[in-house]
Amino acid sequence: MADTETISVLQRKAGARRATAEISPLTVTGALGNALRRAGQDIASIAVSVGAAAEGTAVLESILGELPEQALLCMVEGPDSSFGMAILDNQLTAGLVEAMTVGKLSANASANREPTRTDAAICADYLDRTLECFETEASDAGLSMAARVSGYRYALPFMDPQVISLTLENVVYRTFRVELGLDGDARRGVLTLILPLEPPAKSKQAASGGDGAEVQTVADVALTCQAELRAILHEVQLPVTDVAGLEVGMVLPVPLQALGQVSLMDTDGAEVTTCRLGQVRGQRALRIGPAMAFETAAVPNRDLTGLTAITSAAPQNTDPLQGNVLAQPDTDPAATADQVDIPVV
């Protein structure tokens, strides 16, 4: 009996009955951190350390209002024509470009400059590998949102931030913000990944067959096809002599009514429909639809050529057959004061 008690005491001292520590389950930010580390080794051959990571939600308008200056903005495309964005701040972009071109990071801080298409092309492989590993990590860990972060790859850079609002829907997005250190914190930066919170509406509304396979209609297939169209604002006919004498700054007459009669042509030269030229959020845009009367009440009924006064004393070249006037370059700064902006569509 004494021997049994002695053994029991020794077992308790040795911790034989001590419960093993539980391993914390992998989170979605942890999966993204692992993906960033692996992509750094595989693509840039550089050690990437992951610092603070945060997950949240935000609408596109709020995201665009907080874009860092001189950041590399890249569109990522996922399944069912769903789109997101990857944001690499200036230091991270410069560090990745330097690591993948020179092979190492310099001790000096990166110069402040706007990102270029070349920067985007160099960082594209790193982003693709990160998204691929993120998908694998989330799937292997059995995360509930694994399907929501799968299938995304680099698509193209946004060189003009104003284009983002015309490309991405103003819906709620899931945001992942991760602070990174490159090569032992020789360079620190931030990567922000933005993916749709919900799948596209057409994916949620897709019908299923008896075997569970998605049933595609003709409309579903047609909407995934690409169509090349040309918008023609106005056409003029000029003699060869006038065409040969064209110079920078000359003005060709365009009727103001042409803004509401833009021809949309296919690649064979056939007119598809008539559109109206206008602007949306400061960007030129076409309202596609049937021909519609131009709103003369909003804009004075006059030619666009009348918006720029011709003050040059040089003679005008006139085509007597067409009545087109080839105006000489305007040198009067006050001549553009009467210009009318293109209306909002």
Image (cartoon, rainbow, N blue to C red):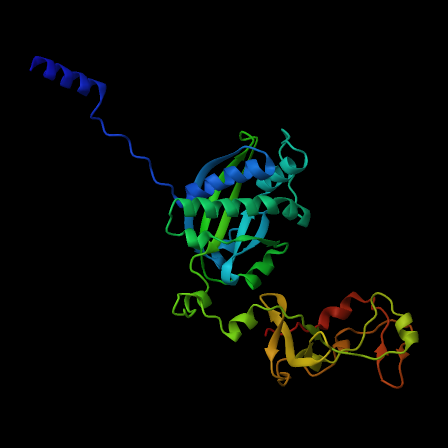
- Left or right of 144, for residue 119: right
Q: Reply above or below: 44 against 142.
A: above
Residue at the (64%, 78%) spot, across then down: 276
Quadrant where the N terminus is found in the figure:
top left
Looking at the rendering, which quadrant does residue 75 occupy? bottom right
Q: Position of residue 121 (x, y in %)?
A: 65, 48
In-image side of 279 versus 57 (left or right): right
Image-quadrant location for residue 209: bottom left
Residue plotted at (23% across, 29% down): 19
Q: Nearer the viewer, residue 317 or 84?
A: 84
Residues 57 and 279: in front is 57
Dividing the picture into quadrants, the one containing residue 14 is top left
Q: Position of residue 241 (x, y in %)?
A: 93, 75
Where is residue 34? Give x, y as percent: 47, 39
Note whether 300 is above or below 184 in the view shown: below
Q: In the figure, 29 relative to 339: above or below?
A: above
From this view, report whether residue 94 is shown above or below residue 277. above
Q: Nearer the viewer, residue 200 or 314?
A: 200
Q: Position of residue 285 (x, y in %)?
A: 62, 70
Instruction: Look at the image and tell me in which quarter the C terminus lies.
Output: bottom right
Seen as rendered, the residue at the extreme front is 211
Which residue is painted at 63% across and 56% down in the image? 160
Q: Residue furthest left?
A: 1
Q: Is residue 234 left or right of residue 345?
A: right
